[in-house]
């Protein structure tokens, strides 16, 4: 995820209060097809060893994306051969069609037996962010197992999901599984650098074929454990939207000269002042706009006194809650558009006044705002005509996908979560503050959901795009089990039942 797993931060938007509406609805009532018995999600010791070894092998292939034009294409090609070797049944089943898209991405079409059921799609990505050796306890592409954990770049973002999807399908197929509902598996190769040659091309291909999807499931949020001191039990966060984004270059041009006779201001000084103004002047606090306020009110009674009183009376305490959220770096992104200086380039020699200074600011746009609104605010804050604005790329926040009892994708996720993780009885919709490949599939569905069936503790969060990224062997086995059950749940005939809030 393009610092995606930051999606989990959506769960923290109320600081110690929680962020999203808790749904304990009975959701969808299923009537299993009687044609085929359900395949139990029980795996032999040999299969469990094989699945963890397959993940280790995937981690050892350094499929790093540095930029849209700089990918490790040798590793990407090797990875394509690797999954063919590890999952032979997937590649040799008559009702599965495999295609390579954009040279290195993979699209699988799994044809179901009931054409009346609308297909869905499972997403994951092959590429990972760079991982310098410094700071790691083990080499980042070793796939080493230590103390019950598999270490390496991609163990949480996102080769765990990719391998779990293919592993679950392989295990189903060798047990003679034939799906009723058709589905797709799309594996992008450049998600970490925008997905324009992977997911975007897959989406265009399917659109040209007239495909419309019931829903999409991608990476994103997790089962969060220990993030909220006032909420002792873990809860599952399913992201139903994503923030928008702008990569904005600020540029100052000046006539170069000798440093012995400097001008009053240099290009570096002008640009530094502009960047400082952006950092010191946050975008407006948008708490109270959109679904967040309603979600907090619905969640209120899950918390002890006095938090429950505060959340049940946001008409009075809204300013207090708003201030609490913006004071914490974790929850601040949920109430406003954020701006982060990520690159600064200037200077050609120590005794030359630099002719050009450039900085890149990464904005993550709150759902209540647009690209154009944020650009205007940024220009008003900088307030210096010498600073030129160049939008490198931008897109508005994504629409909110449904999470009610008629939302098939959301309810199938909820049912599978409560089956595989019976100790988790809170499933909450939220907003992903990172960006994923799923945004490229808006033309194919209105139901896009982002969820990793993995427990995440606060100490693990910093390892995503950081150092010592790892997943426990047990957690990965459970992730395979989740997908194994979810695919079968997708075959279920379902009908809506009344929504109940147990608050």
Image (spheres, rainbow, N blue to C red):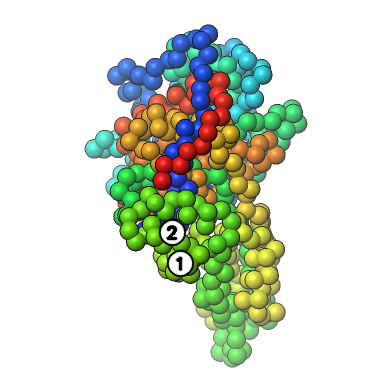
Mark 1, Cα crowd under 10 Å, few <14 / some 14-19 / many 20+, is: few
Secondary element under disc 2, as helix, strand or loop, is helix
Compared with 53, 151 (above or below) is below
Give the image quarter of residue 211: top right
Q: Can residue 286 be seen at all in this image of the molecule? A: yes
Residue lying at 66% horizontally and 76% vertically, measured from the top left: 380
Q: Which residue is mark 1?
A: 317
Question: Looking at the image, how many numbered discs can be counted on the residues?
Answer: 2
Q: Can residue 236 be seen at all in this image of the molecule? A: no
- Farthest left residue? 147
Give the image quarter of residue 213: top right
Q: Which residue is mark 2?
A: 311
Residue 13 falls left or right of residue 101: left
Residue lying at 36% horizontally and 38% vertically, measured from the top left: 424
Q: Position of residue 496 (x, y in %)?
A: 56, 29
Give the image quarter of residue 250: bottom right
Residue lying at 35% horizontally and 19% vertically, measured from the top left: 42
Depth check: give the residue in front, 81 or 473: 473
**Earlier along the polypeptide chain: callout 1 or callout 2?**
2
């Amino acid at each position: 995820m393009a610092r995606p797993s930051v999606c989990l931060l959506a769960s923290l938007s109320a600081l110690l209060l929680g962020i999203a509406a808790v749904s304990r609805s009975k959701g969808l009532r299923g009537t299993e097809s009687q044609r085929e018995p359900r395949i139990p999600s029980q795996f032999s010791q040999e299969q469990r060893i094989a699945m963890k070894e397959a993940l280790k092998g995937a981690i050892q292939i350094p499929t790093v994306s540095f930029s849209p034009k700089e990918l490790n294409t040798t590793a990407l090609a090797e990875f394509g051969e690797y999954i063919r070797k590890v999952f032979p049944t997937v590649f040799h089943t008559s009702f599965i069609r495999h295609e390579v898209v954009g040279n290195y991405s993979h699209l699988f079409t799994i044809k179901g037996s009931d054409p009346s059921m609308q297909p869905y799609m499972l997403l994951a990505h092959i590429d990972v962010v760079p991982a310098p050796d410094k700071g790691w306890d083990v080499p980042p592409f070793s796939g080493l197992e230590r103390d019950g954990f598999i270490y390496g770049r991609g163990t949480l973002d996102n080769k765990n999901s990719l391998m779990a999807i293919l592993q679950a399908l392989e295990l189903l197929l060798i047990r003679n599984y034939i799906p009723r509902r058709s589905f797709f598996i799309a594996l992008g190769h450049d998600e970490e650098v925008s997905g324009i040659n992977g997911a975007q091309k897959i989406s265009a291909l399917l659109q040209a074929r007239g495909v419309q999807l019931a829903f999409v499931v991608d990476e994103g949020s997790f089962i969060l454990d220990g993030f909220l001191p006032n909420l002792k039990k873990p809860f599952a966060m399913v992201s139903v939207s994503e923030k928008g984004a702008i990569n904005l270059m600020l540029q100052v041009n000046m006539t170069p000269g000798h440093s012995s006779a400097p001008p009053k201001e240099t290009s570096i000084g002008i640009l530094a002042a502009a960047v400082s103004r952006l950092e010191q002047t946050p975008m407006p606090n948008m708490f109270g706009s959109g679904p967040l306020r309603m979600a907090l009110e619905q969640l209120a009674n899950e918390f002890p006194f006095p938090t429950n009183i505060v959340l049940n009376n946001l008409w009075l305490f809204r300013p207090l809650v708003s201030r609490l959220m913006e004071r914490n770096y974790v929850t601040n992104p949920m109430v406003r558009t954020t701006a982060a200086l990520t690159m600064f380039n200037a200077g050609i020699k120590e005794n030359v006044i630099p002719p050009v200074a450039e900085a890149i600011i990464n904005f993550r746009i709150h759902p209540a705002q647009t690209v154009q609104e944020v650009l205007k605010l940024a220009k008003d804050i900088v307030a210096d005509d010498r600073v030129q604005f160049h939008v490198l790329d931008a897109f508005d926040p994504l629409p909110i996908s449904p999470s009610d009892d008629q939302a098939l994708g959301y309810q199938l996720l909820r049912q599978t979560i409560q089956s595989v993780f019976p100790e988790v009885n809170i499933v909450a919709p939220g907003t992903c503050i990172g960006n994923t490949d799923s945004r490229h599939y808006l033309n194919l569905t209105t139901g896009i959901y982002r969820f990793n069936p993995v427990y995440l503790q606060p100490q693990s969060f910093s390892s995503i795009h950081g150092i010592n990224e790892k997943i426990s062997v047990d957690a990965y086995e459970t992730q395979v089990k989740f997908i194994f059950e979810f695919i079968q749940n997708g075959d279920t005939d379902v009908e809506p039942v009344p929504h109940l809030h147990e608050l």
